[in-house]
Image (spheres, grey):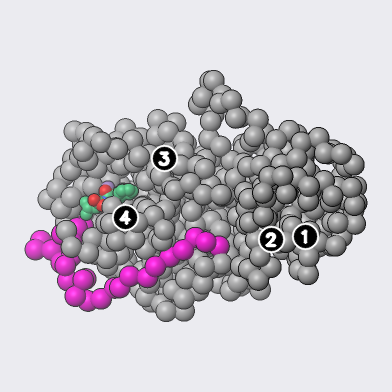
């Protein structure tokens, strides 16, 4: 369990020591309520210090005044928000991340106000989300902690806001989302000797505590059900495969569920088509899709989302041993369609083929979204800024794109078309598992589409965004937890009753 800060909301009043955070615009003005509570002495101290330090209130820039006079605070942290005209663009989540990095000690008080700007309960709650995302650090395997460790210790935070009870309410939901993101990050960061399929399934089972129904299918059951494409990938590993079905029932029993499916390859050596050694350690993150689904189910359950959601993850380890699958093998998938294995390193689509089919067949969902670190080619196409989006449904695709802009977890749609689909026709079976060098992310998506019937479906290729993530104000972790906020937002905006 990741240790987290505690947040409380109060009407504007006197600070209680520790770090005191004040937001100012580029005219160095703070909100009326904050100004009143802080008092003229503190404001005079701020303007004197700002002049001395040439502080101009630019967005995310800070002025730290140690042991200020006339105010109960160890440090006064003045945080710029830039010019008033940009307020609407101000991202409170990111600002929260930036603020978190400026704090030290055990206590902080935030004056959540700006002049001429009605700071909403959502804004205050978003600050707490950003702070939590920024504070996360994966250092459980370091026996000697860094010197800057104290910066990420859990804090006791007081937020002074206009409407404490409303802010408290929204913050509860944000807290659930933060918890989900941190769960996903932790799973992605864990080493592959610790987090193998059975262990991953056990961690998913911990969601029972927040009211998620968890069912674990073991190898015997998977064999009986006919998950042969998935089991073919797992057969070269000593670790057994698992499929986990998670259910959150937050709506009426008759409400059609929405479904999220994740690729959970706990380590991808490539199998017999083995990968080169350089950077192979990164393939511990080849379960980022499954990690996102677990984190999402946690977030939905913890904030009691009024939706029926199912999460399904396919967990395998792709290893080369004497029993491993070979190039040339032909397997019969759960759908009955046959697949010629060309490259054992194109394993994610084999896992997803069976899990997608199963999800659709068993739950008849209103839509399915799958997430997978599926292709290196998506990094070539989109870098690490956007995940690749493929869909058979324009409405779903548009909603995902919009949720991406809202959360900053951005997606970019790429095409599906019969001409690409042809590229995976096989000489010997119904299809082959690779389509050649060109359009590698697209042919992978075409492969998945062969396991989707009429259900609206979207595939997110997160090989560039789910792991080895760029450092931002709200993420310093290798495993980003990408997708939890995106899909939580999709559900919140469109699928809650
Ligand atoms: N897990 C990899 C994709 C990947 C690459 C994820 C880089 C994250 C970073 C996937 O299983 C894979 O190996 N894909 C192959 C497909 C190819 C054999 C058709 C690839 O991208 O090279
Ligand atoms: Mn692979
Ligand atoms: Zn893989």
In the rendered structure, are the residues bearing label 4 and label 2 in contact, judged by CB atoms less than 8 Å apart? no
Q: State the SS at label 3.
A: helix
Q: Disc 2 or disc 3, which is closer to the eye? A: 2
424 is within the stretch colored magenta: yes
Q: List the residue tagged with mark 1.
A: 29
Q: Residue at x 72, y 44 (%)?
A: 52
Q: List the residue tagged with mark 3.
A: 197
Q: State the SS at label 2.
A: loop
> Residue 269, image x and y in percent?
27, 39
Disc 1 crowd rating (10 Å Cα; few below 14, some 14-19, many 20+) is many
The part of the image, by quadrant, that contains residue 174 is: bottom right
- In the image, taking residue 371 as reference, residue 172 lies left or right, namely right
- In the image, taking residue 344 as reference, residue 487 lies left or right, namely right
Q: Disc 4 or disc 1, which is closer to the eye? A: 1
Q: CA distance from mark 4 to mark 2?
A: 38 Å
Q: List the residue tagged with mark 2.
A: 26
Is ligand 1 within 8 Å of the beta carbon of the residue shown at mark 4?
yes
Task: Tell me which label, 3 or 1, sits earlier in the chain.
Answer: 1
| Quadrant including the C terminus | bottom right
Q: List the residue tagged with mark 4.
A: 379
Q: Disc 3 or disc 1, which is closer to the eye? A: 1
Q: CA distance from mark 3 to mark 1?
A: 54 Å
């Amino acid at each position: 369990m990741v240790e987290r800060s505690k947040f409380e909301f109060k009407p504007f009043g006197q600070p209680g020591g520790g770090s005191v955070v004040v937001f100012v615009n580029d005219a160095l003005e703070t909100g009326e309520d904050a100004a009143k509570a802080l008092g003229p002495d503190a404001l005079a101290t701020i303007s004197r210090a700002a002049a001395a330090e040439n502080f101009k209130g630019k967005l995310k820039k800070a002025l730290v005044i140690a042991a200020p006079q006339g105010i109960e605070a160890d440090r006064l942290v003045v945080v710029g928000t830039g010019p008033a005209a940009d307020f609407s663009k101000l991202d409170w989540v990111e600002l929260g991340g930036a603020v978190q990095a400026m704090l030290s000690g055990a206590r902080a008080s935030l004056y959540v106000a700006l002049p001429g700007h009605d700071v909403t309960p959502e804004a205050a709650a978003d600050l707490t989300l950003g702070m939590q995302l920024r504070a996360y650090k994966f250092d459980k395997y370091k026996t000697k902690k860094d010197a800057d460790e104290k910066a990420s210790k859990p804090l006791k935070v007081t937020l002074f806001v206009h409407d404490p009870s409303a802010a408290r309410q929204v913050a509860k939901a944000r807290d659930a989302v933060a918890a989900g993101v941190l769960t996903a990050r932790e799973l992605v960061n864990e080493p592959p000797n610790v987090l193998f399929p059975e262990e991953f399934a056990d961690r998913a089972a911990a969601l029972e505590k927040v009211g998620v129904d968890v069912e674990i299918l073991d190898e015997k059951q998977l064999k009986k059900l006919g998950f042969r494409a998935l089991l073919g990938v797992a057969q070269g590993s000593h670790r057994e495969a698992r499929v986990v079905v998670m259910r959150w029932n937050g709506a009426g029993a008759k409400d059609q569920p929405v479904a999220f499916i994740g690729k959970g390859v706990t380590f991808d050596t490539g199998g017999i088509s083995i990968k080169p050694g350089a950077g192979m350690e990164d393939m511990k993150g080849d379960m980022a899709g499954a990690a996102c689904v677990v984190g999402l189910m946690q977030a939905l359950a913890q904030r009691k989302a009024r939706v029926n959601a199912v999460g399904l993850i396919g967990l395998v380890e792709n290893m080369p041993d004497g029993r491993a699958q070979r190039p040339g093998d032909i397997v019969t998938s759960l759908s009955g369609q046959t697949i010629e294995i060309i490259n054992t390193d194109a394993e994610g689509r084999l896992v997803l083929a069976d899990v997608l089919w199963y999800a659709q067949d068993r739950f008849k969902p209103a839509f399915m979204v799958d997430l997978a670190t599926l292709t290196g080619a998506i990094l070539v196409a989109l870098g690490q800024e956007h995940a690749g989006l493929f869909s058979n449904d324009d409405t779903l695709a548009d909603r995902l794109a919009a949720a991406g802009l809202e959360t900053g977890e951005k997606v970019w749609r790429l095409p599906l078309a019969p001409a690409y689909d042809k590229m995976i026709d096989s000489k010997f079976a119904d299809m082959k598992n690779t389509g050649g060098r060109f359009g590698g992310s697209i042919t992978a998506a075409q492969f998945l589409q062969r396991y989707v019937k009429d259900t609206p479906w979207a595939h997110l290729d997160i090989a560039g965004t789910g792991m080895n993530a760029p450092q931002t104000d709200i993420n310093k972790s290798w495993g980003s937890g990408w997708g939890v906020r995106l899909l939580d937002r999709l559900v919140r905006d469109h699928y809650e009753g």
